[in-house]
Amino acid sequence: MKRISLLGATGSVGTQTLAVIREHPEHFSVAAMAFGENIEKALPLIDEFRPKLVAVKNKWIAERLKAELGGREKIVYGLAGMIEAATFADSDMLVNAVLGSIGLEPTLAAIEAGKTIGLANKETLVTAGHLVMEQAKKAGVSVIPIDSEHSAIFQSMQGQDRTALSRLILTASGGSFRDKTREELKNVTVADALKHPNWSMGAKITVDSATLINKGLEVIEAHWLFQVPYDQIDIVIHKESIVHSLVEYADHSVIAQLGLPSMLVPIQYALTYPKRLELKQTKRLNLWEIGSLHFQEVDRQRFPAMTLAYAAGRAGGTMPAVLNAANEIAVQAFLDGEISFLEIEPLVEAALEHHKPDREPGLEAIEEADRQARAFVRSQIRKK
Ligand SMILES: NC(=O)C1=CN([C@@H]2O[C@H](COP(=O)(O)OP(=O)(O)OC[C@H]3O[C@@H](n4cnc5c(N)ncnc54)[C@H](OP(=O)(O)O)[C@@H]3O)[C@@H](O)[C@H]2O)C=CC1
Ligand SMILES: CC(=O)[C@@H](O)[C@H](O)COP(=O)(O)O
Ligand SMILES: [Mn+2]
C-alpha cells in the first residue's frame, strides 16, 4: 500500500489523482490532503478518502472545516500546514498538484523528509530547479514527473542509453487561440481563452497554454528534471495532443509516448512507477480513428512568451522565478477582467527587464525575487 500526501486535492490534477486512487484502493490510500478554499468540493473527498491530516489555505477556512468535520481529522493551515501535509510521517509519497510557486517549499520539505515526489506543480522546478534537483540527489529521492510532456519523456527514456540522448521535443497543442493572428487576439474574452481544444484543466494553466508560456515553463521544467541544456530542447506544435513528447538519441532514433489526452495516465504512472497498472477510466488509442497527426514549427512572432521563457531559462538564477511570478499575477488579472489577453506578455517582459538578477540564488533570494515580481506587476496593473 502506497500512502499519499496530496496537495491541491480539489483541483484538476488533484481530483484526477483521487480518481486513480479510487480505482486502485488495494494499492493506494490518502494519508494527508491539502486544498485552498473549496470546502464544498473537499468535504465529500475527505469523507471518502479519510485522510488523517487536512491542510487548508488560512485560519478562517480551517475553522469552518473544523466545524463541519467535528475533530475527526487534524486540520492545519497556511504554508506551514501544507508543509506538514507534505512531510506527514504516515505518508510515503507526495503528489504536489497545488497551483503556483507556493508549491516550492512543500516539495523541498518533502524531499528532506525522504518522500518520493510526484510532481505536477511545475512552478517548483521553474522557480528553483537547481535547488530542488540538488537536494533530491543528495537525499536519494526520486522526482517523478506528472506533467504530461515530462511523463512522456520520462517514459521514453526508460531502458535507454541516457548518455546518448541528443534532444527533447515537447509537443504543444497551441492552446485555445492556436489559429488566431495577433490582430484577432485583441478582443478575445476569458471565456474564449478557457476553451482548450484537447485538455480540461484549471483556469490558470489553460490561459498559459494559449500564450504558450505553459510550454516555456515546461522547457525550464524539462531542463532541470532531465538535466538537458536549453539548446537541446525543442517545441513542436501538435494540434491533436496525441504524441505527448519525444526523445531523440544520438543515432537520430526518436522515441515518443502516445495516448488519447488524459492526465490520468501520467498521474497513475507516477504512482505505480516503475510498474504499470490497468486504468479502466481511459480509452484505447486507435490511430485509424484519429486518421492523421499534424506537426508545425512554432511561430515566435505569434507566440512571444515562448521566447521570453527560453531567455529567462538560459539566464538562470532568479530570472525563471520572476518569469513565473509575473505570469501568475498577470494571468490572474486577466481572469479577473482587469487586463486584456494581449497585456499578459508585456507585463511578464517588463518584470524580467525590471529585475536585477541574482545568478546563484538560495531559497531566500528566489522567494524575494518572486515577491518583488508580483509587487511590480501589480503596480503596473494599478497604473493602467
Ligand atoms: N490541470 C492539468 O491538467 C495540469 C496541471 N499541471 C500543473 O498542476 C498544478 C495544478 O494545476 P490544476 O490542477 O490545473 O490547478 P487547479 O486550479 O485546478 O487547482 C489548484 C489546486 O491548488 C489549490 N490551491 C491554490 N492555492 C492554494 C493555496 N494558497 N494553498 C493551498 N492550496 C491552494 C486549490 O485549492 P482550492 O481550489 O480549494 O482553493 C486547488 O486544489 C499546476 O502547477 C499546473 O501547472 C500540469 C499538467 C497538467
Ligand atoms: C496536460 C498538460 O500536461 C498540460 O500542461 C498541457 O501541456 C497543456 O497543453 P498545451 O500546453 O500543449 O496546450
Ligand atoms: Mn504539460
Image (spheres, rainbow, N blue to C red):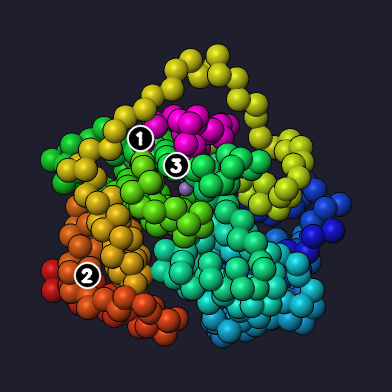
Upstream in the sequence, badge 1 or badge 3? 3
How far apart are labels 1 and 2 at the CA level? 27 Å
Q: Is residue 75 left or right of residue 368?
A: right
Mark 1: give few (<14), some (14-19) or many (20+) Cα within 10 Å. some
Q: Is residue 40 above or below residue 80?
A: above
Question: Magenta span covers which residues?
Answer: 236-260
In the rendered image, residue 358, in percent from the top left (x then y), is placed at 30, 78
Asked whether residue 235 is drawn in magenta, I would say no
Q: Which amino acid type is shown beneath numbered disc 3? A: Ser
Q: Which mark is residue 58?
A: none
Q: Is residue 19 left or right of residue 225?
A: right
Mark 3: give few (<14), some (14-19) or many (20+) Cα within 10 Å. some
Q: Which residue is mark 1?
A: 237
Q: Which amino acid type is shown beneath numbered disc 2? A: Ala
Q: Which residue is mark 3?
A: 166
In the rendered image, residue 89, in percent from the top left (x then y), is placed at 76, 77
Quarter residue 359 falls in: bottom left
Q: Is residue 178 above or below residue 225?
A: above
Quarter of the picture containing the N terminus is: bottom right
Q: Nearer the viewer, mark 1 or mark 3?
A: 3
**What residue is drawn where x is 64% and y is 77%?**
112
**What residue is drawn where x is 55% and y is 82%?**
78
- Element carrying mark 1: strand
Q: Which amino acid type is shown beneath numbered disc 1? A: Ile
Q: Nearer the viewer, residue 304 or 139?
A: 139
**What residue is drawn where x is 55% and y is 14%?**
288
Mark 2: give few (<14), some (14-19) or many (20+) Cα within 10 Å. many
How far apart are labels 3 and 2 at the CA level? 33 Å
Q: Which mark is residue 351?
A: 2
Upstream in the sequence, badge 3 or badge 2? 3
Asked whether residue 247 is drawn in magenta, I would say yes
